[in-house]
Image: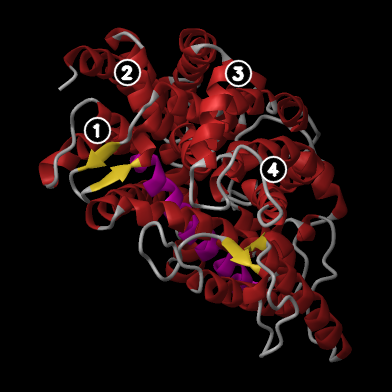
């Protein structure tokens, strides 16, 4: 047991716990018994709070643990996270302004609320809501993977229930202050999380290269390792087989990023359009941090860092690479600060994700189908309970399923959430796509995506199915026709599934419009997509439905 690290970690964890409970009184409303207040923080976060909230939401513990671990294991492929987080912000700059405006004008809390109003279709809204919840669950579980990697490096590496006990305690505390304070808790804690992360990474990328002989020596060690690797995809440069996969994975991930419910929750909690404009312009600065962080994977190679063997599975856990690098290269007190940064970096996004999933359940399942006359207080109560269920469902996932499988599920989560792009993102600009065609496109994209993912093996883990998201073009089979037979070039499954989704939606729309099938009544107006704070007659926050 690393006692100095554990004490520093515990003190900082105690600090954010206190902040989580105090957050209920921070910018307090008359009552938190309304989803505008509990689930969206009163829709009044300014530029700085939104910066830390969205940054804390998108740059998670899994990012800080797994991206350098991927570079450590596979090399250049892991850098896909850098271009995708850079291009995401220009891509969504205008769409999220429209989403904020229409949601503020109509009182929408979730993307499925918008779809319900835009297409007058409870079924399409339900599909979007369930898709969002399913895609979010493995993402929450992955925060636990990052937190467990830190706990394992500090000495908690048991094989049974006791090995998971510290994780369970941490999430019980998280559940309690999120239940009480709602979105205000992760928004306040995100300040501490981001300051610690910036401090640790900047120290690491200056101190460690100087200690290990400079970046030339670090890249040389990485090149030597990958040159000896038997895996053809590994290396500090991409090759002919994985370049297309890299590009489509980066683009697909960028398109998916703000379709996740927790991303939209951070957007809708903002005070106005100007706040979002400033943040979309400034948030790419996080990508600079991410690029520096990713290089720690190569630093770990040069330092000779070895992953800890997970006593629960008997296999090395590559997610412990960065914690072990810090363990071996920094003084114990600073390693404790670094571990706290990663641990708190797990709590902030996990809280936001559970709140977003709870909002979807409450507004688009509970209120729509189970209790249409639910009051605002009943909605808030339902969301609080749902957020607890989501958190402990993620904990159970980690307790009873190999965490490595959860990491593969995150890749599946990206494929899943991409299938909501036509119904959510495109609908912000046009209703030309028909609601029934959108359902058909979603079904085809989801089904084909899952079929393709099922056929991908993972030789490293010995799993025959759902072994990743990189598909060889040779495996594309259209009713027996193989257009790229013999090709070993890989592509991102989510990109292929989305193309199928869009094709079916367009063709289906042409057919059903020809048959004069109703497309429902649009519950929004053109003016709704341009409202801003301060406009006259703007819907009051926490107003009735």
Q: Residue at x 62, y 57 (%)?
A: 113
Distance of label 1 from label 4 (alpha carbons): 44 Å
Say which mark, if any, is on residue 216. 3
Say which mark, if any, is on residue 152. 1
- Magenta highlight range: 121-145
Q: Seen in the image, is 424 located left or right of residue 123?
A: right
SS class of the residue under badge 1? helix
Is residue 195 depicted above or below 221 in this figure?
above
Q: Seen in the image, is 193 located left or right of residue 312?
A: right
SS class of the residue under badge 2? helix
Distance of label 1 from label 3 (alpha carbons): 31 Å
* Front position among marks 1 and 3: 3
Q: Seen in the image, is 398 located left or right of residue 355?
A: left
Say which mark, if any, is on residue 113. none
Bin the neighbour count of mark 3 within 10 Å (Cα to Cα): few under 14, some 14-19, many 20 and up: few
Tell whether label 2 touches label 3 (CB within 8 Å): no
**Which residue is the site of mark 4?**
104
Distance of label 1 from label 2 (alpha carbons): 14 Å
């Amino acid at each position: 047991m690393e006692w100095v690290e554990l004490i520093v970690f515990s003190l900082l964890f105690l600090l954010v716990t206190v902040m989580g409970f105090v957050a209920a009184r921070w910018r307090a409303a008359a009552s938190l018994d309304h989803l505008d207040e509990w689930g969206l923080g009163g829709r009044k976060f300014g530029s700085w709070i939104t910066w830390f909230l969205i940054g804390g939401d998108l740059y998670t513990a899994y990012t800080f643990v797994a991206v350098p671990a991927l570079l450590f294991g596979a090399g250049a492929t892991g850098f896909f996270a850098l271009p995708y987080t850079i291009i995401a912000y220009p891509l969504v700059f205008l769409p999220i302004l429209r989403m904020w405006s229409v949601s503020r004008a109509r009182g929408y809390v979730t993307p499925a609320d918008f779809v319900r109003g835009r297409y007058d279709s409870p079924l399409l809204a339900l599909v979007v809501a369930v898709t969002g919840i399913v895609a979010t669950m493995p993402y929450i579980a992955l925060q636990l993977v990052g937190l467990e990697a830190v706990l394992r490096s500090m000495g908690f590496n048991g094989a049974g229930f006791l090995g998971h006990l510290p994780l369970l305690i941490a999430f019980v505390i998280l559940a309690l202050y999120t239940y009480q304070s709602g979105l205000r808790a992760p928004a306040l804690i995100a300040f501490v999380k981001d300051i610690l992360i910036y401090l640790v990474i900047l120290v690491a990328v200056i101190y460690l290269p100087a200690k290990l002989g400079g970046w030339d020596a670090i890249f040389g060690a990485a090149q030597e390792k990958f040159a000896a690797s038997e895996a053809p995809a590994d290396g500090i440069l991409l090759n002919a087989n994985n370049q297309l996969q890299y590009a489509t994975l980066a683009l697909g991930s960028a398109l998916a990023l703000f379709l996740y419910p927790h991303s939209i929750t951070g957007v809708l909690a903002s005070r106005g359009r100007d706040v979002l404009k400033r943040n979309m312009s400034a948030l790419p600065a996080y990508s600079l941090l991410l690029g520096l962080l990713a290089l720690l994977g190569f630093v770990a190679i040069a330092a000779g860092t070895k992953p800890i063997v997970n006593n629960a599975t008997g296999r090395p856990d590559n997610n412990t690479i960065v914690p072990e690098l810090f363990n071996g290269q920094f003084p114990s007190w600073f390693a404790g600060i670094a571990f706290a940064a990663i641990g708190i970096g797990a709590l902030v996004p996990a809280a936001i994700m559970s709140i977003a999933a709870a909002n979807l359940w409450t507004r688009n399942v509970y209120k729509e189908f189970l209790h249409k006359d639910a009051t605002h207080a009943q909605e808030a109560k339902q969301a609080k309970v749902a957020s607890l269920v989501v958190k402990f469902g993620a904990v159970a996932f980690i307790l009873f399923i190999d965490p490595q499988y959860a990491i593969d599920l995150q890749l599946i989560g990206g494929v899943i959430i991409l299938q909501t792009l036509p119904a959510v993102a495109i609908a912000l600009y046009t209703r030309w796509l028909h609601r029934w065609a959108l359902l058909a496109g979603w079904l085809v994209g989801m089904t084909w995506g899952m079929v393709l993912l099922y056929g991908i093996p993972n030789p490293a883990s010995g799993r025959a199915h759902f072994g990743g998201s990189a598909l060889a073009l040779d495996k594309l089979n259209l009713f027996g026709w193989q257009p790229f037979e013999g090709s070993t070039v890989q592509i991102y499954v989510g990109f292929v599934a989305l193309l199928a989704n869009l094709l079916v939606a367009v063709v289906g729309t042409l057919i059903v419009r020809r048959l004069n099938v109703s497309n429902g009544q649009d519950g929004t107006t053109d003016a709704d997509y341009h409202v801003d704070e301060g406009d006259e007659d703007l819907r009051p926050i926490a107003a009735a439905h």
